[in-house]
Amino acid sequence: MESTKNLKNVESPDDYFEEYESLDVHELMLKDNPRVLAYKNAIFNKKDLFFNKIVMDVGAGTGILSIFCAQAGAKKVFAVEANKCSLLADEVVKENNFIDIIQVIPSKLEDVKPETIGKVDIIVSEWMGFYLVHEGMLDTVLIARDRFLNEDGQLFPNIAKMYAAPCQLPSMYDFWDNVHGVKMQCIGNKIRQQKKSKPEIMLVDDRDLLADPKILAWIDLKTAITVDLDIIGGQDLVFPCQQSGKLQGVCIWFEVEFPDGSLLSTSPSDYPTHWKQTSIPMPNSAEVVEGEPLAFRITLNRDMKDKRKYNLELIVLNPDETEHEIPCDCYMTKCIVTKQYMEIHN
């Protein structure tokens, strides 16, 4: 028995580049300490890579990553920024006395001619959107890689991973059971009906995760191609519950890895970022117990009408009819026996 839940992409302004002309957006990102420090530390930890090298910053915004690269010893930094924020990046470069090293290029990356700047040694970019791929900027980074990066060049970050786990969503469910002594479950139901057509960007408490996460996607930026990003996930996943609770949704988050091995994580277990987490709320709450297997198929399909957006599809599967990992920690007899057999013979 399968049940399906389709979710449309997160709504955003029609003009992607105009959205990023708002200073409020850049202030939000610059005040996101885990985000900024992850990049700064990764760059400074690899000063030997940056020293006397040519760097491209794709989607440079206000230019802070370009400044980090220059501070790390880069010989030349091309800061590519398509919107009017490039004017501010120019001012930031002048304010920090890097005008001889950093060249702001006010253009879409796709419009920059390879012969105008030649090859670069390193590409730096903060391209991630909600649930990793919303906004579709990774496509631009891959174009930059193919056109401009030396064969032995480096990408910061170079690996991206997307995770999912079933969860409780008490703010969307339990709150309405008792609003200062008044039951309002009917309102909660209507709100969830309104939200069911798109994922919810919110902070999820790690204590509300019902199972260990599974990887939805693993993207190597050095080898990935654009067509790989059209359909993400789609595999059948079984989650053995690590605690009893209420199944109310599925939580999605991501992490990226840098060449020094450091991570920028948006996990519920890590310090919050402006990306928060993405939840797919269930229409109804269901009691689950420790050891119970939950099975889903989660697929992100690129919207062919607007390739910067994705449609999320959640299919609830029957765990009895879904293949389990070996070993599996769920309470089904076949999984208990298999796990015991492996423990005895290892």
Image (tube, helix red, strand yellow):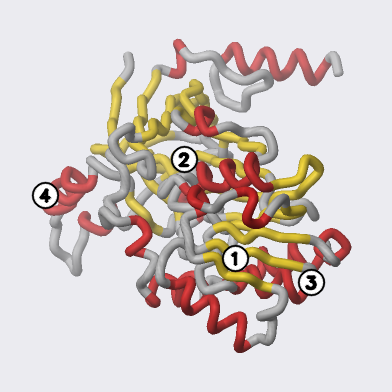
Give the spatial CA distance, label 2 vs label 1.
50 Å
- Labels in figure, total: 4
Residue 85 as seen in the image, left or right of residue 263: left
Query: Which numbered marker is on residue 244?
Result: 2
Label 3 crowding class (10 Å Cα cut-off): few <14, some 14-19, many 20+?
Answer: many
Q: Which residue is mark 1?
A: 79
Contact between labelled residues 3 and 2, with CB atoms less than 8 Å apart: no
The kind of secondary structure element at disc 1 is strand
Marks 2 and 4, Cα distance to the nearest angstrom?
A: 25 Å
**Residue 248 seen anywhere in this rendered image of the structure:** no
In this rendering, the answer to whether 82 lies above or below 214 is below
* Label 4 crowd bin: few (<14), some (14–19), many (20+), radius 10 Å: few
Measure the C-alpha gap from mark 4 to mark 1: 52 Å
Q: Position of residue 116 (x, y in %)?
A: 62, 55
Give the residue pinned by disc 3.
72
- Whether 332 is drawn above or below 97: the answer is above
**In front: mark 2 or mark 3?**
3
Residue at image point 46% right, 34% down: 289
Mark 4 belongs to which amino acid?
Answer: Cys
2 or 3: tag closer to the N-terminus: 3
Give the residue type at disc 3. Answer: Ala
- Is label 4 in a helix, a strand or a loop? helix
Q: Is residue 98 above or below residue 119?
A: below
Which one is in front in this view, the residue at disc 2 or the one at disc 4?
4
Q: Is residue 165 left or right of 153 when viewed as pictured?
A: left
Q: Position of residue 296 (x, y in %)?
A: 43, 26
- Residue 21: name its quadrant: bottom left
Q: Residue at x 74, y 56 (%)?
A: 262
